[in-house]
């Protein structure tokens, strides 16, 4: 399943739960409670809040562990030992890409920097979704390690606003299937 | 604890304060409408319905960003001032100076953008302001940055006056924040929530504005002496430290209106508690150190800062969900709430804040940010909690004040129509951004790929509906604000 679609469903679920909480309270808001009901509601509310705190805490710890256990960004000061290496330099408003023909199934190291201002180096898959990105910043080199799984034409777009022709700053990568030398 | 009296005497505005408050709020309402129209122009350009040239698009984008952030700050500062002055002695000159400096700063920004052609986005990421490829001069960049500095100086003046007033009344800022009751002691039930929130804002946003001032001065020096080269990553850290706190401070100032006013419409006391004090204490720290979540795609950033950015993004949700939003829900639950414009807007504001930070928190995850950063997911989440959270907080106070001047809470059919248009338009507008973001539509593009245009058209229609609602609000509120204050008899105004 496409990662962005998972994020979308999780987000809608979270926002929906918040909305449900508000809808419940709003539907009850017009009926004033007497003193006994108010005291009972107060006790229930405190218990529910403690449970919610615990649930959110466990969720946060779990997601943090799962998402950082294998750190999603490669080490920046060590050789990445990738079979394919691509040097990328962003300029206003072109990409200088050292190698545009790549092979799927083998890791690619992208070394991304900029010569003038900040740019955003994002790779779009043939289906139009972003697969990976980093910033291209003058004076720094950000390293990405990525393995293309599907052959096809990938598009590079600039995702950091860099001036008047920012939206036209694109390039392409041709990713061939393993063993395909054409 | 704040009063349950609907229009208490200590909130009445003497002549000078009345004029100052009206200046702030009428200016803000007009600017909100103007900035929304600029935003609509961007969306209709992307939708290919009424396109403007790319150079104009990016100027509008710069103006819209700087204008909206500044206007939200101006209006939410007035919210903080309106309530804080009841508890501590504020000087009117500081409040007015902030307005004057804001207007001077705004004029600089408008000149820089529309005369000087400056278009570096409101975040002015170095070195773009001095690397325009001939589209604007260093002079235009300098005027823009001086505009920011003037606005920052005005805010600092106001904060320093407020800090001094809190220290005079409570002894120090720590006691204003209620830290003495975090672990032990009987909490003073009359300790005002407005003072707790204001103290937090003063601490955090003063640091943010100082960081902003440092980076602006660095950039100004570099503009005229390029040999004084800057480190782009350090500059970016400082900009986001400033920018994140500046925009977040608007929420924390605005929410004071909800704390103060909602209980008057529910008739239920909304007391101060230890969880409340804890939430504001930790929020003070979180808002200061969470900014690296804006730099998750800068892999050169130290790894511990990226990890901190993710973890604090998650942690920052706890006070919002479990204390403020939950507190509002328990306050309205079984309360016999009177559904008037201020109470409806207050509930909307907390919903907008709580729901809007869900996609924000999720985007604070490094692996999520890797595919969502700088897509329309980002304007999606911040438009959600600014349009449906912060702006309704400000409108809550304005409708309340207008109600006090008309001797009855505002609740006309036109008001309700405005609210319906605003909510439907606001939710659709923000959700279209979020949907487009998950489809990888880039933000800040003057021209879109053909497959992205349908989202832009849907967003444009939603924006028009939203702006219709805002126009109704603005017209109604400006007329209401300019009416003479009513001679309220408190005996007939109890909640």
Image (cartoon, rainbow, N blue to C red):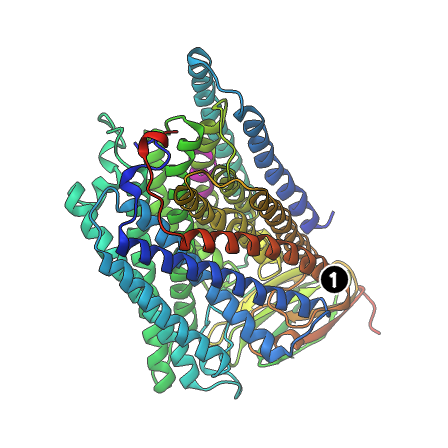
Q: Looking at the image, is B55 positioned above or below residue A64?
A: below
Image position of B142 (left or right of B473): left
Residue B323 percent across, percent down from the top left: 42, 34
Residue extending farthest top = A36
Q: Quadrant of residue A145?
A: bottom right
Image position of B97 (left or right of A102): left
Residue extending farthest bottom = B134
Q: Nearer the viewer, residue B316 or B187?
A: B187
Q: Quadrant of residue B45?
A: bottom right
Viewer can see residue B181: yes
User: Is residue B219 within the magenta segment?
Assistant: no
Identify the element where label 1 is drawn: loop
Which residue is the site of mark 1? A128
Q: Looking at the image, is B300 positioned above or below residue B140?
A: above
Q: Main secondary structure of the magenta part?
A: helix
Q: Looking at the image, is B351 positioned above or below residue B51?
A: above
Residue B144 percent across, percent down from the top left: 41, 76
Q: Nearer the viewer, residue B355 or B70?
A: B70
Viewer can see residue B365: no
Residue A152 percent across, percent down from the top left: 79, 66
- Residue positioned 45% across, 82% down in the render: B130
Highlighted magenta segment, given as a residue range:
B316-323
- Residue positioned 53% across, 65% down in the render: B34
Q: Quadrant of the C terminus of chain A?
A: bottom right
Image position of B318 (left or right of B48): left
- Residue positioned 63% across, 70% down in the render: B445
Residue B47 percent across, percent down from the top left: 71, 66
């Amino acid at each position: 399943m496409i990662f962005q679609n998972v994020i979308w469903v999780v987000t809608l679920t979270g926002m929906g739960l918040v909305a449900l909480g508000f809808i419940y309270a709003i539907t009850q808001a017009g009926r004033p409670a007497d003193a006994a009901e108010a005291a009972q509601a107060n006790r229930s509310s405190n218990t529910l809040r403690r449970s919610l705190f615990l649930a959110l805490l466990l969720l946060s710890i779990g997601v943090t562990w799962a998402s950082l256990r294998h750190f999603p960004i490669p080490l920046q000061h060590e050789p990445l030992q990738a079979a394919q290496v691509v040097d990328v330099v962003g300029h206003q408003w072109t990409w200088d890409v050292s190698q545009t023909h790549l092979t799927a199934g083998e890791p690619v190291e992208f070394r991304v920097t900029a010569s003038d201002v900040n740019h955003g180096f994002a790779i779009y898959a043939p289906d139009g979704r972003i697969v990976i990105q980093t910033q291209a910043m003058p004076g720094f080199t950000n390293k990405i390690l990525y393995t293309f799984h599907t052959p096809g034409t990938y598009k590079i777009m600039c995702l950091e606003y860099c001036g008047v022709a920012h939206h036209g700053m694109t390039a392409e990568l041709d990713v061939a299937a393993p063993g395909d030398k054409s | 604890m704040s009063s349950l009296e609907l229009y208490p005497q200590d909130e009445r505005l003497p002549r000078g304060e009345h004029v100052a408050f009206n200046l702030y709020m009428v200016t803000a309402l007009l600017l909100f409408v103007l900035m929304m129209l600029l935003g609509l122009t961007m969306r209709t350009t992307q939708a290919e319905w009424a396109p403007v040239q790319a150079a104009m698009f990016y100027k509008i984008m710069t103006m819209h960003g700087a204008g909206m952030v500044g206007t939200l700050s101006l209006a939410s500062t007035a919210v903080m001032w309106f309530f804080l002055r009841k508890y501590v002695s504020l000087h009117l000159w500081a409040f007015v100076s902030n307005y004057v400096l804001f207007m001077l700063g705004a004029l600089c920004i408008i000149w820089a953008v529309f005369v000087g052609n400056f278009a570096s986005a409101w975040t002015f990421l170095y070195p773009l302001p001095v690397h325009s490829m001939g589209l604007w001069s260093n002079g235009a960049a300098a005027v823009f940055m001086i505009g920011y500095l003037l606005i920052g100086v005005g805010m600092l003046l106001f904060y320093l006056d407020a800090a001094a007033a809190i220290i005079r009344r409570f002894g120090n800022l720590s006691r204003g924040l209620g830290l003495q009751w975090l672990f032990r002691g009987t909490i003073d039930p009359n300790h005002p929530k407005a003072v707790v929130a204001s103290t937090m804002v003063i601490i955090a946003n003063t640091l943010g504005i100082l960081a902003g001032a440092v980076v602006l001065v660095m950039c100004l020096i570099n503009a005229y002496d390029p040999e004084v080269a800057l480190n782009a990553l350090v500059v970016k850290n400082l900009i986001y430290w400033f920018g994140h706190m500046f925009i977040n401070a608007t929420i924390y100032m605005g929410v004071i209106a909800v704390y103060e006013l909602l209980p008057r419409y529910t008739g239920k006391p909304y007391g101060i508690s230890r969880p409340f004090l804890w939430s504001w204490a930790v929020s003070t720290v979180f808002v200061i150190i969470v900014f690296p979540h804006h730099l998750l795609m800068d892999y050169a950033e130290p790894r511990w800062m990226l990890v901190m950015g993710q973890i604090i993004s998650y942690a920052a949700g706890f006070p919002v969900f479990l204390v403020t939003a939950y507190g509002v829900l328990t306050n309205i639950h079984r309360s016999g709430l009177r559904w008037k414009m201020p109470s409806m807007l207050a509930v909307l504001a907390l919903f907008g804040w709580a729901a809007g930070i869900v996609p924000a928190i999720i985007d604070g995850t490094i692996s999520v940010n890797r595919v969502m950063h700088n897509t329309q997911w980002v304007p999606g989440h911040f438009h959600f909690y600014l349009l449906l959270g912060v702006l309704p907080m400000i409108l809550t106070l304005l409708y309340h004040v207008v109600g006090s001047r008309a001797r009855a809470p505002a609740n006309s059919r036109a008001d309700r129509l405005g609210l319906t248009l605003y909510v439907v338009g606001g939710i659709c507008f923000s959700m279209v951004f979020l949907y487009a973001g998950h489809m990888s539509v880039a933000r800040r593009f003057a021209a879109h790929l053909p497959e992205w245009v349908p989202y832009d058209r849907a967003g444009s229609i939603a924006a028009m509906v939203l702006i219709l609602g805002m126009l109704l609000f603005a017209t109604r509120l400006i007329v209401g604000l300019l009416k003479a204050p009513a001679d309220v008899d408190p005996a007939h105004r109890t909640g």
